[in-house]
Amino acid sequence: MSGGIEEPKVADRPGTALVTGASSGIGFAYAERLAALGHDLVLVARREHRLALQAGRLRAEHGIRVEELPADLSDAGALARVSERAGRDDVDLVVNSAAINGYGPFAEGDPALLAKVVALNVTALTALSRAALPGMLERGRGALVNVASLLAFSGSLPPSPGGLPQRAVYGGTKGFVVTFTRLLAAELADTPLRVQLLCPGLTATEFHLTRGEEPVSGDTPRVHAIGGMPVGDVVAASLAALRTDESVCVPGLDDPAALDRLVSAEWGIRRAAGAALAPRYRDEA
């Protein structure tokens, strides 16, 4: 309930929602909201004990079925198991929320950690999208939400002490999510499926408490000191946008025309495709 008015379900007959990164943060906030709307859940996260505690609470509070799938999605075997589950015919919604940041200077970064950032933020998200969509298309219903970040749009903003982190790989992976999901939404625009790109800004979760080598310890979710938008607000914005078929949701954006200006800027750059060499390069040529 919200303000005494029952929120509409994401689908007329809510099916099962598969949510990754579901042991805390944005992923668990989705799980809570979807449980309240009557969806059965498949929850995926690498912290098995934390996941079991969260799943047990949702079962007790909402009387729904909750399936736990402990998995590190950067591992190919674990990803294959979760992909198989995402492709089953009861899954009507997939929320790809799992991510790690790997923050730090690129030239000094641990190659194994940077590979894990790409494997989780890009490869797993792509694989789970691919696993779920064929069945949804065949059934004529379903939705996909891919969680990116406003850091995907921060390429012109250098890292700064006390400000934006050193994030070349993380920002690059979220840039992939932005382009991939927007193009996928356009590709599926004439189908009954809904595809959403969610781009939150700084959110009050535990995301910044670790770079991602290991999950945050303990069974009680925490919030990093730098705060941010309440996680429930981020998810509320996403589900509201899903109901109104907004393919790009930026929860804190007051001026949606900014997205139109982004599209216009892209068209302006794309005009260079197939054009003659720009004058400033001709002397070198």
Image: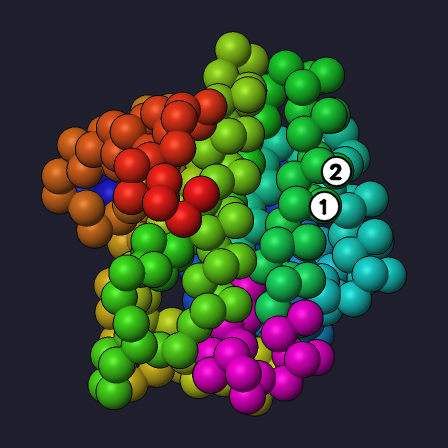
Height in image: 241 above or below 169? above
Residue type, numbered disc 2: Ala
Q: CA distance from mark 2 to mark 1?
A: 6 Å
Residue 75 horizontal side relative to residue 153, left or right: right
Residue at the limit of the structure toward the top, as seen here: 190
The residue to which callout 2 is attached is 131
Figure quadrant of the C terminus: top left
The residue to which callout 1 is attached is 127
Residue 163: give x, y in percent of width and height. 24, 79
Residue 161: give x, y in percent of width and height. 25, 87
Residue at the limit of the structure toward the left, as seen here: 254
Q: Nearer the viewer, residue 261 or 132?
A: 261
Q: Residue at x 21, y 51 (%)?
A: 252
Number of other residues with Cα within 10 Å of mark 2, as a class: few under 14, some 14 to 19, many 20 or more: some
Residue 123: give x, y in percent of width and height. 68, 53
Q: Residue at x 44, y 62 (%)?
A: 171
Magenta residue span? 99-115
Q: Nearer the viewer, residue 90 or 187?
A: 187
Instruction: Answer whether labels 2 and 1 touch (C-beta < 8 Å).
Output: yes
Height in image: 15 above or below 1? above
